[in-house]
Amino acid sequence: MIMILSDGTQISLADASFNKHYVISCQDCEDFKAQRDKLTEQNLAEIQITDGGQTIATVRNAMLTGVQEVINSDGSVTGHFYFSGGETVQPESEYSEVGRILMGEE
């Protein structure tokens, strides 16, 4: 999975199974800090979460409210980013579109 920030920066996600809690894997502490520094207010204006090129969700105007850095035994870092606020927009599924067509809305 990939998190795409407003400026187009892409951050690989190890996990995004929790709403507004994203996990990344970094080589070391410096790599983690570099990734964290990309999460500016401007870059969080719109975040897209993609998997295999498909957009899973778009989050607008999220605020970074917490960060956790876990140093692993091999020196790598597992980073947790916690967000609050914002509006999460799920892409429409084929079923939603078919339903609107059958209801005469399209």
Image: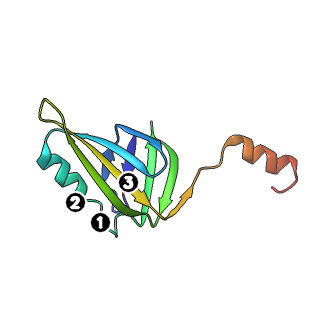
Q: Are marks 1 and 2 in contact (CB under 8 Å)?
A: yes
The residue lying at 34 percent from left, 64 percent from top is 43
Could you say whether the residue bearing mark 2 is in a helix, strand or loop?
helix
Q: Which residue is mark 2?
A: 37
Residue shown at 50% from the left, 46% from the top: 55
Question: Closer to the camera, 63 or 46?
Answer: 63
Colouring chosen for the image of the structure: rainbow
Image position, residue 82 (x, y; %): 37, 54
Q: Give the residue displayed 49% in from the left and 64% down from the top.
A: 86
Q: CA distance from mark 3 to mark 1?
A: 14 Å
Would you call the spot at circle 2 few (<14 residues within 10 Å), some (14-19), or many (20 or more)?
A: few
Quadrant location of residue 93? top right
The quarter holding residue 24 reads top left
Q: CA distance from mark 1 to mark 2?
A: 7 Å
Name the quadrant of the N terminus. top left
Outermost top residue: 74
**Identity, as a three-letter code, of the amino acid under mark 3:** Tyr
Measured as percent of width and height from the top left, residue 76 is found at: 16, 36
Q: Earlier in the sequence, mark 3 or mark 1?
A: 1
Q: Where 85 sits versus 4, above or below? A: below
Quarter in which the C terminus is drawn:
bottom right
Residue 40 is left or right of residue 73, and the answer is right
- The residue indicated by pointer 3 is 82
Kindly state the secondary structure of the residue where label 3 is placed: strand
| Residue lying at 73% horizontally and 41% vertically, measured from the top left | 95
- Three-letter amino acid code at disc 1? Thr
Percent of width and height locating residue 11: 31, 47
Is 39 placed left or right of 15 in the picture? left
Residue beneath disc 1:
40
Q: Which of the two discs, 2 and 3, sits closer to the camera? A: 3
Residue 69 in the image: x percent, y percent? 23, 47
